Every structure is written in structure tokens, then in C-alpha cells.
Amino acid sequence: MGIITDVRRDNGESERAGRIDLVGEVLQDVGNEVAAVVSAPGEYVFRAFTKFFEFIGESSILLTRTVRFILAGRIDLRDTVNQMAFIGVASLPIVLVTVAFSGAVLSLYMSQLGVRWGFGGYTGGVIGLSVARELGPVLTAVVVTARSGSAIAAEIGTMKVTEQIDALRALAVSPVQYLVVPRLIAAIVMLPVLTIFSDIIGTVAGYLVAVVNGVAGGGYVSSLKSQVLPSDVVKGLVKTLFFAVVIVIVGAQQGLRTTGGATGVGRSTTSAVVISIVTIYILNFFLAYVMFGGKTAFL
Amino acid sequence: MIRAIQLSYRVGNKTILNYLDLAVEKGETLAVMGMSGAGKSTLLKCIGGLIRPTFGAVEIDGVDITRMKESELDAVRVKIGMVFQYAALFDSLNVYENVSFGLRRHKLMSEEEIAEVVRTRLAIVGLPRTENLMPAQLSGGMQKRVGLARALALDPEIVLYDEPTAGLDPITSAAIADLIVKTRNELGVTSMLVTHDIATIKRVASRVAMLHSGKIVAVGTVEEMEDHPNPIVRQFITGSGEGPIRITE
């Protein structure tokens, strides 16, 4: 009995010791990172800038090459249609669910406050504008990034580490023409289409929630008609063209620079999603500022 | 036919190829042997136009391909078939689509003619009636044979093999080696393979080159290499743990 207790104690202690070792290692890594930043801030900043400019340079070259192939008409229609189905049609359900519930929750707050303070009649206009200008385009782009941007990086990354990209080049086939061109065209065509569906479902979901919360249905629709101009919808769709370029070019760029097997593919996929989403949000601000900014924005 | 002149390749501070000179004559099969990590695959990719050397030239039929634009290189790549270490088959395409890939992309012939080329190439590599199988359904040896069929589909003048028997059992390795000989004899291609598999080298190579420390340290027939005065070559051929080559942890 005594021996068993001792063994159990030993096991517990070694388990604890293992955990302490692990915590120690993590703390050491964090310490090293902090030490690197504190002791050599210049070098740290320099490395970060180098990586940033590498990314900008590679993405610009990739985009230029892709556009050059498109302008030269070197487009594979079958591959493009397949990508349109993957990026567009297959993304539709998840895009609809995401934007519908976002429109619904926005309408929930808006209609409750509106009914309480007497501006419930504006709910349709506010929801419509929010969805057409921001929620529809941005959420659609984010969902497509999560679903298709990650897939682009993972697929191209896997092809890179298994030498399939080299095999393409050995067969005198440009990886940019074969892999990036169809995806870019598909995203540029399908993102606005998805956004149109998003705009409709977001506004309809907002309507249902507003009516349940006591806003008059007719008032919602008339406010929507008077506040949301066709140009709001069109400008929202124009934004998605920029987002489409970001999703595909970042995904492909991260995929094509993948090294290091399965770990590398995972790293590229994560980077592609993070970089794309951050870029989309930053870009969205500037596009909104240019398209909807200024004193006359809400007139 | 193939000439590497003062070929150098560096990554950061690491020198992979160090002013290397090598020639492959038309119709011969040259095997480049060397330790793992010696730069054999890098050499092959430089010759195949897949990576640009840091310095030096690669001449194919007297034309330096290292200074060519990507579009010009494509015309050379069509003349070179490449068989990759792990086959590198396109995993979303079936065997037929893999073998016909280059022909279809370059629109070189009608679909009927393409089907005939695929059939004959698969017959050469001993895999008839496998057209509808996906790469995941094939064994390692079968994948390499499909990779060879794909490389042969464009009717190349040169075939480059990167570790053609790596990861295969001795019997499958021998079958692949025989296939390399058969390909050379039937299609008259110039072949270059990089490998550290001595049995394969003895089976296929008309000449052997030893790559060590980024340079070709010896070239000769298999018999000449077996009795070579250079102790590095002798140690490699005999697989001895004693000699100038030391494995460092």
C-alpha cells in the first residue's frame, strides 16, 4: 500500500514538474521576445518593416502578373466557373445566415430605442443604410475570407510544399495563370453578387425584428425607400471589388511563399485570414471615407 | 546537350552549389550522387529552369537559360521532362488529367490525339487502364510512374529525375530503374538523375558524377567510380562509416 501511495505521489509530482517546465518554457519564450524588443528595438522594428515591405512587394508583383494574364485573355473559363461555384454559390448559405442575424440584432436595438423615444419610423432607413453601406459588403467579405481565402492559401500552400507548383512550372504552365487568375475573376464577379443577397436578407431580417418590436411595417419600408439611395447600394458593391482583390491576392501570396510542410501550410492559412481581414477593415474605412465621407454624406 | 558552367547557388550565407561544372551528353544517362542535403535537387532544379542560380550558366543545346525571361524559359521547359521526388502529381486531378495536363494546357493536339498519347505513355510506364484513378489511390511506386508518364507526355528531349527511387522498396526501385533504361532506349531521351541509391545508379547510369561540398569532385563510369582514387567517392560507393565524410550531429 505504501509503495502504491509513493508511486502515486511520484506520478503527481512528475506531472506537476512537467507542467512547471512547460510554463517555464513559455515564460522563457515570452521573456526572449520581450528582451529582443527591449534590447534591440531597432532590429525588431527593422525586421517588421522588412516583412511588411516584402509582403507589399510580393503582393503587388502577383497582382500585376495576374492582371497581365487577364488583359492578355489567358483565362481558363472552366476553372473560373468552378471557382465561381466554390467562392460564390457554396458561400451563399453562411453569408446569408451571418448577415441576416447581424441585420436582425441591429434592428433589435434600433427598433426598441426607436419605439421608446419616438423615432421608430427611421428604423428602416438606418438598417437599410447600415446594411447596404457596411454590414453587407464587409461581413460578406469577412465570411468569404474565412471560407475561401483560407482555402486558397491552404491549397496553394500544400501545392507549394509538395512540389506541385514546381511541377506546373516544369510543364511550362504559369502557377499565376493556372491558380490565381480564375480565383481573382471568380471573386470579383461573385462578391458583389453575394453582397446583393446579403443586402436583401439583412434588410428583410431587420424588418421582421422591427415589426415584432412594434415598428409599423409600412413605416419601415417608406423610411427604407426614402433614406437608401441606389448609389448607396452601388457604392457598397464597388467596395467588394477591392475586398475581392485583397482576399485572393493575400491568400495566393501567402500560399506561394509557404515553406516547411504541414506546419508551414497552417501558418500561411492563418496569416492569409488575419492579414485579409485586417486589410479589409482598414481599406473599408478609407473607401467609406472617400465614397460616403464629407459634409453631404447623409443628405 | 546540358552544360552547367561555374554554377553557384547561395541562400543567405549558405553555399549550396559552389562554382560547379558539369556536362551531360546527348542520349546518355548521367547519375549525380551525393549525400542527403548535398544540393542534388537544387542542381536539378537549376538545370530544369525552376530556380535561377546565384552565379554561372546552364546551357541547353548551347543556349544559356539562366538569363531567359519566364516566357522564354517555358519554350525550353517543354523540351525537359521532370520527375519529382514524391511524384508531385496534381492531387485534385485523376491519372488521365495529370498525364494530359501539359498537352491540354498548351492545346498541342485534339482530345482524341491526347487520349492516344496518354494511353501510350501509361503503357510505357506499365500502368494501363489506370486513367480514372486519383493519385491518393496509387502506391508510391505507381505515383512515380504516373509522374514519369506525365513528364513524357510532352515528348521531351531531356528527362530529369529527382531521387526516382526514394522511399520505395528494393523490388519497386529496380522496376523504376528498369523503366528509366526503357525510356531512354525507346524514346532516345537524354537523362539525368540525382540519387544516393547506388543500386539504381549501377542499373541505369552510363556515367556518374559525385557532388560534394557544392562541387563535382569526380566523374566517370560506374566501374571507374568504384576504383576511384578520391577517398570521398570510394567511401560513398562502399557506404563506409570510415573516411573523409563525417556525419556531424
Image (cartoon, rainbow, N blue to C red):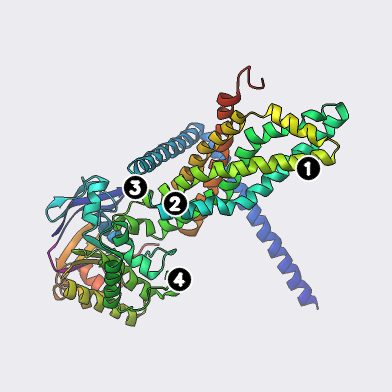
Q: Which residue is mark 2?
A: A80
Q: Which residue is mark 1?
A: A208
Q: Earlier in the sequence, mark 3 or mark 1?
A: 3
Subunit ID for the residue under disc 1: A
Q: Tell me the mark number nearer the camera, choosing from 4 and 3.
A: 3
Q: Tell me the mark number nearer the camera, choosing from 4 and 2.
A: 2
On screen, residue A61 above or below B151: above
- Picture quadrant where residue A221 is located: top right
Q: Residue at x 19, y 60 (%)?
A: B216
The boundaries of the magenta stretch are B24-30
Residue A74 disc label: 3
Amino acid carrying label 1: it is Leu
Q: Residue at x 61, y 30 (%)?
A: A230
> Residue B194's spot in the image, x, y percent?
26, 66
Q: Earlier in the sequence, mark 2 or mark 3?
A: 3
Q: Residues within 10 Å of mark 4 (few under 14, many from 20)?
A: few
Q: CA distance from mark 3 to mark 1?
A: 47 Å
Q: CA distance from mark 4 to mark 3?
A: 30 Å
Numbered disc 3: secondary structure: loop
For the N terminus of chain B, give its image quadrant. bottom left
> Residue B228's spot in the image, x, y percent?
15, 71
Amino acid carrying label 2: it is Thr
Q: Which residue is mark 4?
A: B136
Work out whether residue B166 or residue A1 is closer to the camera in this orientation and state it: B166
